[in-house]
Image: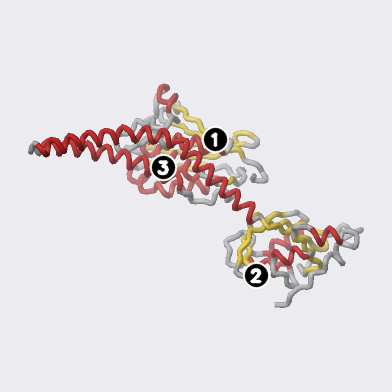
Amino acid sequence: MQKLHVTNGKSGFGWFGKKIFETLPVGIVAFDRNLKITDANPHAAKLIDLTDKIDKSLQRGTDGSASASQDWSQQLESVILTGKARTFESVRYTSNGKTKLLRIACAALKKTGTGKNCGGTIIIEDITEQVNTRCQLANAERLATVGKLASRVAHELNNPMDGILRYINLALRTIEKQDLEKPKEYLTHCREGLVRMVQIVSELLEFSRNTYSPFEHVRIEQIVEDSIKTMDTKGEASKVKILRNYASDIPEIRSGNLFQVFCNLTKNALDAMPNGGELNISTRMSAKDTAAVEFRDTGVGFDAEEREVIFEPFFTTKDRGKGTGLGLAICKDIVERYGGKITADMAPKGGSIFTVYLPVRSENT
Ligand code: ADP
């Protein structure tokens, strides 16, 4: 493919801005209404493989990626046509076998005098480092949450471990005395203790798993639907009807660990309706910058005393082996890290209402 000669701002940007144009640490490309490149600074050539046309230059590095910005001709033409600027975040661009993450901002260029759009310009920024650092930070945040729970976990594991040790000692002593009924009983206690420890550990491991990349922007209902899917068989078995009522005006949201939150709220609702019932999941804007996701069930509910401690780690009313009491504590932690909050209310006609309030901003930060 023909390579474009970088013109260093001679034509589209004029003599005055030439120096700035040449030294800017971002790529700038100007193009006409047929998407033919008219100008590009040296940094642009470092970030993307420039050819004669801007759509082709972008397409060749982003082909095969799942990005919504794949059809570059369409996207750029619409910017020129509508005059509406657009920014594409975290575009995966591969060149010479190396993949970078780029932020690409496009705007229309107006012809002086006529005010008509005669082409466009794009500014390309390499944000690979920035995104990696943010991912590392999100991971560190997750680990910090686990760390906070660790001392409670150690305390909670202490009891079953102590029990196991005592019963093993008793079993050994009884075996020495040849009385074989008792060791069976002691080993049963050991197994119970172990089951509890395994549960606590697997719940913590579950927390470190993530379905979405932490900074992906997605529609809230997509995360909710994905969490329902993981619970599908449980819902069917308990004959729970899941109803949805999603508002259409909620901006996309940074996915973070919301998947875990919604999985846990769905699981708890299903657990609260062992003989069937209804789980109503709805979304709405509760204030200008706050989205609310509500899980309303017709299950066993909880009383005022339980409500006081419902978000405390290790509070559970579930049978031995069925609950650890970690789920809601983790949900609360995740939601608060978002700058949001989670509430638990008793439904007027019985059942529970858990509501997650999340800050949303139109620019999706
Ligand atoms: P776990 O599910 O392991 O018990 P959670 O922290 O998720 O831990 O929940 C703590 C307790 O809160 C549950 O044991 C239950 O008593 C109560 N709870 C949670 N969700 C509901 C619900 N939808 N309806 C009634 N009670 C609930």
Residue position for label 1: 336
Quadrant assignment for the C terminus: top right
The first of marks 2 and 3 along the sequence is 2
Q: Is residue 80 above or below residue 52?
A: above
Amino acid type, mark 2: Arg
Q: Secondary structure at mark 1?
A: helix
- Local crowd at mark 1 within 10 Å, few (<14), some, or many (≥20)? some
Q: Do the residues under discs 1 and 3 have CB atoms within 8 angstroms?
A: no
- Cα distance in 3D space between marks 1 and 2: 42 Å
Residue shown at 44% from the left, 44% from the top: 207
Q: Nearer the viewer, residue 288 or 323?
A: 323
Nearer mark to the viewer, of 2 and 3: 3
User: At which x and y percent is residue 360?
Assistant: 62, 40
Indicate which quadrant contains ligand 1: top left
Corner quadrant of residue 307: top left
Q: Which mark is residue 204?
A: 3
Q: Do the residues under discs 2 and 3 have CB atoms within 8 angstroms?
A: no
The first of marks 1 and 3 along the sequence is 3
User: At which x and y percent is residue 185?
Assistant: 16, 36
- Cα distance in 3D space between marks 1 and 3: 18 Å
Residue position for label 2: 60
User: At which x and y percent is residue 330?
Assistant: 46, 37
- Cα distance in 3D space between marks 2 and 3: 42 Å
Residue 339 falls left or right of residue 119? left
Residue shown at 29% from the left, 36% from the top: 161
Q: Secondary structure at mark 3?
A: helix
